[in-house]
Amino acid sequence: MLGRTVTLYDTTLRDGTQGQGISFSLLDKLRIAEKLAQFGMGMIEGGWPGSNGKDLDFFREARKRSWGQTKIAAFGSTRRAHLEISKDPQIQTLREADTPVVTFFGKSWKLHVTEVLGTTPEENRAMIADTVRYFKQLNREVVYDAEHFFDG
C-alpha cells in the first residue's frame, strides 16, 4: 500500500449550494475556494458550468489565480445518449471551463439507465467511456461520479 495517495475532493461550491436558502455569489465562491486551497484541499469542485452563468464566471476568474497544489474541477454529466460528443453542448461547456480536472456523473443503476435516460446499458457504458476518452485526450484529469452506484 505504500506509494498510494489519497486526494481530498471538496464539493462545497456545487453540492453545498443545494441546501435550502443557500446561494453563493461569485465573490463568495472565490473566497471559499481560496480558504480551501490554503487549507490544502487537493481538489475543489467549482461548480457545473453547464447549469448557470455564475459557475462559468467562477471558472473564468479561477483561471486568473494561482491555487498552489490545489486543482480546480468542473462538474457535469456524460455525453447524451446517441449524440456525438463533439455535438453535445454540455460537454463543450465543460471543455470551455478549461480546468485541470473534469468530474462527471453517469448513471450506475440499470433502472435509471433504462427509465430515466431511456437507453440501453451498452449505450450507457459507451457514454461513460466516450466522455472519459474525450477529456483524457485533452490531457484533463478525470473523476467519474458513479451516480446511484449503491442503489444499483
Image: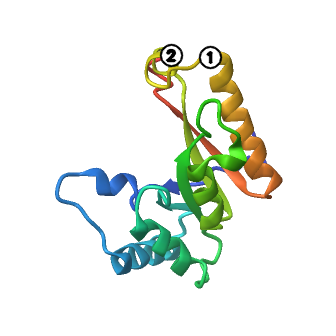
Q: Is residue 32 left or right of residue 133?
A: left
Which residue is identified by label 2? 114
**Is residue 58 visible in the rendered structure shown here?**
yes
Among the two numbered marks 2 and 1 on one chain, the one whose residue lies closer to the N terminus: 2
Please tell me which residue is depicted at 37% across the width and 52% down the height of the picture: 15
Task: Using the image, determine if residue 121 lies above or below residue 27.
Answer: above
- Find the residue positioned furthest to the left: 21
- Where is residue 57? Give x, y as percent: 47, 75
Identify the residue position indicated by label 1 in the image.
Answer: 121
Crowding at dot 2, Cα within 10 Å, few <14 / some 14-19 / many 20+, comes out as: some
Residue 52 at x, y = what percent?
A: 40, 62
Residue at 72% of width from left, 42% of height from top? 132
Q: Nearer the viewer, residue 66 or 40?
A: 66
For mark 1, does the 10 Å Cα neighbourhood hold few (<14), some (14 to 19), or many (20 or more) residues? some
User: Is residue 84 positioned above or below 111 on the image?
Assistant: below
Task: Relative to 16, say whether 84 is above or below.
Answer: above
Mark-to-mark CA distance, 2 and 1:
7 Å
Kindly identify the amino acid type of the residue bearing the numbered disc 1: Pro
Instruction: Judge whether 47 appears above or below 146 on screen.
Output: below
Residue 124 is situated, as x and y percent measured from the top left of the image, at: 62, 25
- How many numbered markers are drawn? 2
Q: Amino acid at mark 2?
A: Thr
Q: From the viewer's perspective, tell me whether residue 116 is left or right of residue 129.
A: left
- Residue 2 shows in this picture: no
Indicate the quadrant where residue 26 lies: bottom left
Q: Residue 43, how many percent across, how many down?
A: 57, 61
Q: Could you say which disc has been placed on residue 74 in the image?
A: none
Q: Secondary structure at mark 2?
A: helix
Tell me whether the residue at label 2 lies in contact with that at label 1, contact meaning CB atoms closer than 8 angstroms.
yes
Residue at point 60%, 78% (across, down): 63
Residue extending farthest to the right is 137
Q: Quadrant of the N terminus?
A: top right
